[in-house]
């Protein structure tokens, strides 16, 4: 058979696909409905995704665009105009942050827009390599940057934005958050993004300092100051030109807090037993695991020291207040321990997803990390984490009567945490309630958790909000995912109705971008208040 005849029988699209896969730039094509139809090999690398995760699916079901920004692909579909050399930052479905430089063009046939094509160049990897190279050159320094923080929720992204802005100056910053929320990640991120990133980063947990030695450790000692004392620089001198991070600042004794306040005000200090004033060029970052008002009222923090330390105060949201970050974080930790343990775990089951979304996470991200690590230690040949692999007994303590949850960073968070923890009764793992989206979801989930099983709760079905009763009664025979969609539709519809069909206001309440809310309205087959252009 001739070469001409052989070539004639082959699918010409196969040639195009192979050619596109050998291009060293990402290529992503969507059709008029915003569904992905072409996704080349380089794009899978840039976005850490598989073809099967993207092809045939709506763009907004796979990627999140924070801060109300619009996808350049959808922009090309709506306007019919190309966009060139646009930097775009967004998140994949695992919560990984992606930054690309895009050239995007509409695809036109017979005068009609039938799709859009995006050609992307990676800048995330380049920026990361530069930062990692700088890190290797430092003898001392922080290990984490803002890129190390996983999560695309609006609450978390807002705090990251404020931290990035605070990094531009030398003002003191106080980071407030429950145990396990990632306070040190934010502190190290601030240091790395600041003009002091080339200097030392010294971290000290104040609760670990012996009270009788703490002054010498912080300010240094002079020979003869006390029996056995030697000339030794303290943490302030060791951090000269860089950043000193004082964790659990509220555990310092009041007299020492007064000396710390003086050092911050005067920008100078004395070693223990010395009479000479030493100037200091150190930025102070501090953290605590309770709200400053509670610490001040309880006599654990001087109010004047708070005003000096909290020039900028960052309040980190607990994990239970950003449920959309739970599953991306779980996938992130699975990837980490896959590398560490040389395993190939693909994810968690639908039942585990529901349990994770219902659990109040009093230990926050650290608890989730240790839960994933513990579960993966129990796997043999399985590739999916099931309920049986989780430390259910330990985790379910927060749902027992009187168990409650860890006190929030804000004083009033404790009450909500107790409700979310199921303070009125324990529920079985199989009965873990489905999670809802948005502000209505939070209240409904608390009610579901507090009520426990409808068959065993003291108040019976009446313990649930009346408007949820039809949903609960009609959920029999539905799969878990169908029930999740049912409750999601309830939260979305309530938010849209409450704002009179105003998509912008409803999306802000739900913590979603406008595009994401439009996508959910279409996915859930809910009537849209208006018919804006695709992606608006």
Image (cartoon, rainbow, N blue to C red):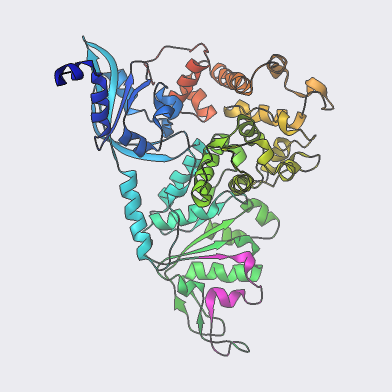
Question: On the image, which quarter does residue 171 sit in?
Answer: bottom left
Does the magenta run of residues contain 312? no
Front-most of residues 467 and 480: 480
Q: What stretch is highlighted in magenta?
A: 203-225
Q: In this view, does 159 lie above or below 74?
A: below
Query: Would you say residue 311 is visible in this rendering?
Result: no
144 vs 123, left or right, is right
Is 414 on the left or on the right of 106, as rendered?
right
Residue 84, by quadrant, is: top left
Residues 454 and 3: in front is 3
Q: Check the image and name the residue furthest to the front.
A: 1
Quarter containing the C terminus: top left
Is 30 on the left or on the right of 203, as rendered?
left
Report whether 102 appears left or right of 213. Answer: left
Q: Is residue 209 in the magenta section?
A: yes
State the image coordinates of residue 423 (x, y, percent, origin top left): 77, 37
Question: What residue is shown at x 32% (from left), y 54% (from top)?
Answer: 130
Closest to the observer: 324 or 476? 476
Residue 534, by quadrant, is top left
Residue 96 pos. (x, y %): 44, 40
Number of marks: 0
Image coords of residue 188 (percent x, y): 46, 57
Q: Quadrant of the N terminus?
A: top left
Coordinates of residue 104 in the picture (x, y in percent) = 26, 28
Give the residue drawn at x 72%, y 22%: 465
Visible residue check, residue 119? yes
Q: Which residue lies furthest to the top in this view?
A: 110
When the figure is inspected, residue 145 is found, relative to residue 449, above or below; the finding is below
């Amino acid at each position: 058979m001739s070469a001409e005849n052989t070539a004639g029988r082959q699918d010409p699209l196969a040639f195009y696909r192979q050619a596109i896969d050998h291009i060293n730039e990402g290529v992503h094509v969507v059709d008029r409905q915003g569904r992905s139809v072409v996704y080349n090999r380089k794009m899978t690398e840039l976005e850490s995704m598989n073809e099967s995760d993207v092809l045939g699916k709506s763009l907004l079901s796979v990627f999140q665009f924070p801060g109300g920004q619009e996808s350049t692909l959808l922009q090309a579909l709506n306007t019919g105009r190309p966009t060139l050399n646009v930097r775009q930052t967004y998140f994949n479905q695992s919560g990984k942050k992606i930054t690309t430089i895009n050239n995007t063009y509409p695809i036109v046939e017979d005068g009609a827009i039938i799709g859009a094509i995006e050609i992307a160049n990676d800048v995330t990897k380049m920026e990361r390599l530069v930062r990692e190279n700088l890190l290797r050159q430092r003898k001392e320094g922080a290990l984490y940057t803002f890129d190390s923080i996983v999560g695309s929720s609006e609450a978390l992204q807002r705090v990251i934005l404020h931290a990035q802005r605070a990094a531009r100056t030398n003002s003191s910053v106080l980071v407030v958050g429950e145990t396990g929320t990632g306070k040190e990640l934010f502190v190290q991120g601030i240091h790395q993004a600041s003009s002091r990133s080339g200097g030392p980063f010294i971290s000290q947990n104040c609760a670990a300092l012996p009270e009788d030695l703490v002054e010498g450790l912080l300010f240094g000692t002079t020979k003869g100051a006390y029996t056995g004392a030697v000339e030794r620089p303290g943490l302030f001198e060791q951090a000269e030109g860089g950043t000193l991070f004082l964790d659990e600042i509220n555990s310092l004794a009041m007299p020492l807090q007064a000396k710390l306040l003086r050092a911050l005000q005067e920008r100078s200090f004395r070693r223990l037993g010395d009479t000479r004033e030493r100037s200091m060029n150190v930025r102070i970052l501090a953290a605590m695991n309770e709200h400053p008002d509670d610490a001040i009222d309880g006599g654990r923090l001087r109010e004047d020291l708070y005003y000096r330390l909290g020039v900028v105060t960052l309040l980190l949201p607990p994990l239970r207040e950003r449920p959309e970050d739970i599953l991306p974080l779980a996938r992130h930790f699975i990837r980490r321990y896959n590398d560490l343990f040389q395993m190939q775990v693909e994810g968690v089951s639908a039942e585990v997803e529901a349990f994770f979304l219902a659990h109040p996470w009093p230990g926050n991200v650290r608890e989730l990390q240790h839960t994933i690590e513990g579960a993966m230690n129990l796997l043999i040949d399985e590739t999916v984490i099931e309920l049986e692999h989780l430390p259910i007994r330990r985790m379910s303590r927060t749902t027992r009567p009187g168990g409650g949850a860890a006190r929030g960073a804000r004083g009033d968070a404790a009450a909500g945490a107790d409700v979310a923890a199921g303070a009125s009764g324990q529920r079985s793992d199989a009965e873990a309630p489905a999670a809802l989206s948005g502000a209505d979801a939070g209240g409904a989930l608390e009610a579901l958790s507090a009520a426990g099983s409808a068959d065993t709760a003291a108040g019976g079905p009446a313990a649930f909000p009346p408007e949820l009763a039809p949903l609960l009664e009609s959920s029999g025979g539905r799969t878990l995912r169908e029930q999740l969609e049912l409750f999601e539709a309830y939260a979305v519809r309530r938010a849209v109705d409450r704002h009179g069909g105003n998509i912008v206001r409803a999306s802000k309440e739900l913590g979603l971008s406008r595009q994401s809310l439009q996508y959910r309205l279409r996915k859930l087959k809910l009537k849209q208040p208006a018919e804006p252009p695709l992606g608006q």
